[in-house]
Image (cartoon, grey):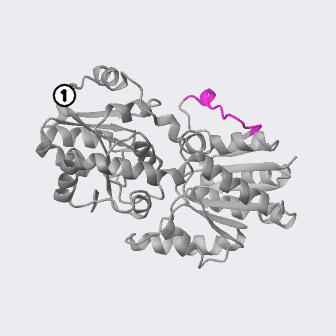
């Protein structure tokens, strides 16, 4: 029975968000599964990972120079050295960095290390500091990687210049398209729950409230978007800043910062337009979910949204407020419906059934099967 270890910085907002379908696939294949990540639940007892035989709570920190990562490295190395794994599949910059360093001895014994880059921190237009800090590290650690998996075309082209034993492209972490089909009555129910009038137009964003996600630009557009509400599902350090900005703009009564939600699928059904204003993305799952839900999508141009909305006329410069307002008005018009049809057809390649099969092929290939 093959043994596989999944490594990521956190459980709640990474392993459970993206990797449960892959753990399920592995269990159905008869493999033994393990996960090493930090338990980031407010109540640690809530940490339950489906299809996982063994869980190791490793104190990873997102900041690569945080001293706690030294302890995380030691604990992870022991897990790897004692585990006898056939494959280690690592994710997230810090988790992947420490894994590839800690797996040195395991690789000598035949363990294969796979790394999925969910969006390199160096990209076209990235700050110089990102290139100086992250590019040399990823280039060096590629030599300690048996398969480097990229999820967008820009990263794939760049990764081929590195010296991983193999570089592969997989179209994202996958999405269960069928999960986002429409259900009668949800639109009215969710709007009533949130206190939003049925005749209002609702703009929806899903993502952490941080600088990169750039919700600020949508808030600044709202004063000129009459009868439009803005709802954001997500939590983060800028929650209070955005509440203050909404008040200063005089739109507090039309802004709902809903926090972390487990019912996001219902929010998609309640909204009229999905807005994704991020500066940087690898291949955003939230945007895929919105496309699957049949929403017109307005997004800032970056490598991830370019791959998903290839050919769309509703891609805007993340810093261009006027361009955003124009695209929102187009999305709310009959033209927006034409984009919905095109988006759904394009989305088929990102379906979870396709991506799990591609990852399965990678696993079997490194095992020589």
Q: Is residue 126 left or right of residue 368?
A: left
260 shown above or below 213: above
Percent from the top left, x then y, of residue 332?
A: 22, 44
Q: Magenta stretch?
A: 43-54
Is 138 covered by the magenta stretch? no
User: Of helix, strand and loop, which mostly describes the magenta segment?
Assistant: loop
Q: Quadrant of residue 39?
A: top right
* Residue occupying image coordinates x 68% and y 55%: 359
Residue 58 percent location from the top left of the image? 67, 46
Determine the image quadrant of residue 147.
bottom right
- Determine which quarter of the picture holds residue 183: top left
Q: Residue at x 38, y 23 (%)?
A: 184
Residue furthest bottom in the image: 161
The quadrant in which the C terminus is found is bottom right
Q: Between residues 14 and 357, which one lies in front from this camera angle? A: 357
From the viewer's perspective, tell me whether residue 180 is left or right of residue 258: right
Above/below status of 80 relative to 167:
above
Observer-nearest of 67 and 64: 64
Residue picked out by circle 1: 199
**Position above or below: 10 against 49:** below
Q: Nearer the viewer, residue 196 or 70?
A: 196
Q: Is residue 57 something one can see in this rendering?
A: no
User: Is residue 366 in sight in this rendering?
Assistant: yes
């Amino acid at each position: 029975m093959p043994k596989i270890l999944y490594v990521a910085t956190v459980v709640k907002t990474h392993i459970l968000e993206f990797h449960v379908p892959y753990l399920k696939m592995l269990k159905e294949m008869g493999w033994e599964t393990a996960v090493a990540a930090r338990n980031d639940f407010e109540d640690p007892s809530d940490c339950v990972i489906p299809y996982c035989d063994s869980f190791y709570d490793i104190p990873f920190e997102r900041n690569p120079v945080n001293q706690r990562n030294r302890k995380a490295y030691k604990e992870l190395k022991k897990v790897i050295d004692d585990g006898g794994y056939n494959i280690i599949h690592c994710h997230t910059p810090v988790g992947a960095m420490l894994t590839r360093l800690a797996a040195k001895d395991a690789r000598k014994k035949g363990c294969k290390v796979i790394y999925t880059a969910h969006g390199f921190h160096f990209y076209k237009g990235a700050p110089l500091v990102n290139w100086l800090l992250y590019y040399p590290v990823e280039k060096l650690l590629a030599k300690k990687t048996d398969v480097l998996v990229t999820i967008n075309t820009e990263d794939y082209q760049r990764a081929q210049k590195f010296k991983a034993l193999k570089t592969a492209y997989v179209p994202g972490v996958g999405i269960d398209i069928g999960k986002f089909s429409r259900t009668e009555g949800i639109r009215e129910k969710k709007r009533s729950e949130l206190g939003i009038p049925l005749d209002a137009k609702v703009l929806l964003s899903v993502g952490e409230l941080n600088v990169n996600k750039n919700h600020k630009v949508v808030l600044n557009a709202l004063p000129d978007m009459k009868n439009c509400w803005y709802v954001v599902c997500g939590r983060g350090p800028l929650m209070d800043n955005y509440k203050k900005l909404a008040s200063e703009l005089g739109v507090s009564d039309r802004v709902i910062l809903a926090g972390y939600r487990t019912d996001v699928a219902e929010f998609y059904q309640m909204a009229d337009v999905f807005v994704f204003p991020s500066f940087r993305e690898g291949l955003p799952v939230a945007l895929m979910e919105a496309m699957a839900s049949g929403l017109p999508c307005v997004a800032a141009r970056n490598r991830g949204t370019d791959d998903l909305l290839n050919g769309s006329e509703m891609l805007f410069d993340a810093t261009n407020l006027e361009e955003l307002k124009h695209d929102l008005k187009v999305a709310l018009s009959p033209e927006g419906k034409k984009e919905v049809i095109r988006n759904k057809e394009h989305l088929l390649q990102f379906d979870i059934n396709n991506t799990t099969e591609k990852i399965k092929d990678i696993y079997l290939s490194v095992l020589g099967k």
